[in-house]
Amino acid sequence: MPHEFSFRRLFIPVNRGSDVLNSLRFALKSINMETIRTVKELQRAVKKNLLTPLGFVPTMGALHNGHLSLVRNAVSSCPQVVVSIYVNPTQFNDKSDLKNYPRTIDDDLIMLSAVLREKDIVFIPIDKEIYPEEDKREFHFGNLDRVMEARERPGHFNGVAQVVSRLFEIVNPDIAFFGQKDFQQLAVIRELVRQTGNKVKIISNPIIREEDGLAMSSRNRLLESEVRKKAGVIWSAISEASSMIHDHDIPFLISYVINTIEKAEGFHVEYFNIVDDEELIPVNTKEEMKKGKRYFGCVAVKAGKIRLIDNIEIPL
Ligand code: AMP
């Protein structure tokens, strides 16, 4: 059984407010890793010359096993790892979404303490550390900034680029780990690194799923229980579409995904596009799919009040 479950099992039955629990938490935290809040302290704790490559996993917290898979990957390949937990306000185009974003810092630290080592660092900055003054920078990512998430969430990727470039500047990692779950974000970050000439190596990790196939996400805990029960339909629809590519054309697959998901009450598909993984140009026919490129079916769904995204590779 993976490590972190035993920690969670240990803590769940205990009264969360109790002194015993707090001291256990403190003990766990202090044994396993350093928790840092300021840029100055972080830069002092990073032993860049001694422990190379330095690994970095940026997160917004409310951690789950998807995040932990990134952290594990970082720990297995880097002698020192920084995990950041920061809910970046500039990437939220919807302020109520920012307000409702889950924040579970105590549980996050318990989960991380099961994976991180003494020399690893959890960086939990306040806004002023990341943005000492308002960040007015504007980034341009061409087509990456015009399709799918960029259309539905105007300004989102500019905010992502602001926070990621700032975090890269602060942490100065050699390798940074991101999830394939945020497919378009990954393409944007690769482009950001290319544009800025940063030497950081970007590693992508596969999507970790719940038993019914729902991609793990911090937002899943916000799903109403009736909606959550049906949410596996997103994965089943896109994985079926992926396996049907050889016998059907693309418009059929798009209708299939939309109709299958929307059969579930309260589910609305914002888009399902099949795109290449570099420029994210949507293809309308199989003939447009070029050998040597990789294609992914990307979906965004409003499930009740919560917005979920997922993707799957579409084989040629
Ligand atoms: P977030 O906290 O949502 O900003 O996510 C932090 C990192 O975890 C991003 O690189 C995400 O792509 C990645 N991530 C989130 N969910 C998953 C998942 N289910 N499987 C793998 N990586 C994930």
Image: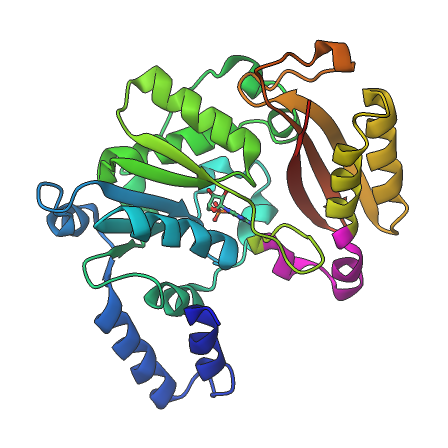
Residues in magenta?
A: 219-232
Q: Is residue 52 left or right of residue 19?
A: left
* Residue at 62% across, 13% down: 291
Residue 224 sits inside the magenta stretch = yes
Give the percent coordinates (x, y) of residue 58: 38, 45
Quarter of the view holding residue 55: top left
Q: Is residue 264 left or right of residue 25?
A: right
Q: Nearer the viewer, residue 124 or 244?
A: 244
* Residue at 79% across, 40% down: 240
In the image, residue 7 sits, relative to residue 294, either above or below, namely: below
- The outermost residue toward the left is 49
* Residue at 55% across, 20% down: 145
In the image, residue 209 sits, relative to residue 248, either above or below, namely: below
Q: Nearer the viewer, residue 254 or 126?
A: 254
Q: Is residue 194 left or right of residue 48?
A: right
Q: Is residue 156 visible?
A: no
* Residue at 50% across, 81% down: 12
Quarter of the view holding residue 250: top right
Give the percent coordinates (x, y) of residue 162: 38, 30
Give the percent coordinates (x, y) of residue 151: 65, 24
Q: Is residue 243 left or right of residue 84?
A: right
Q: Nearer the viewer, residue 38 or 270?
A: 270
Q: Is residue 153 visible?
A: yes
Residue 137 sits inside the magenta stretch = no
Give the percent coordinates (x, y) of residue 293: 58, 17
In the image, residue 316 sits, relative to residue 240, either above or below, namely: above
In the image, residue 212 sits, relative to residue 250, either above or below, namely: below
Q: Main secondary structure of the magenta part?
A: helix
Tag count in the figure? 0
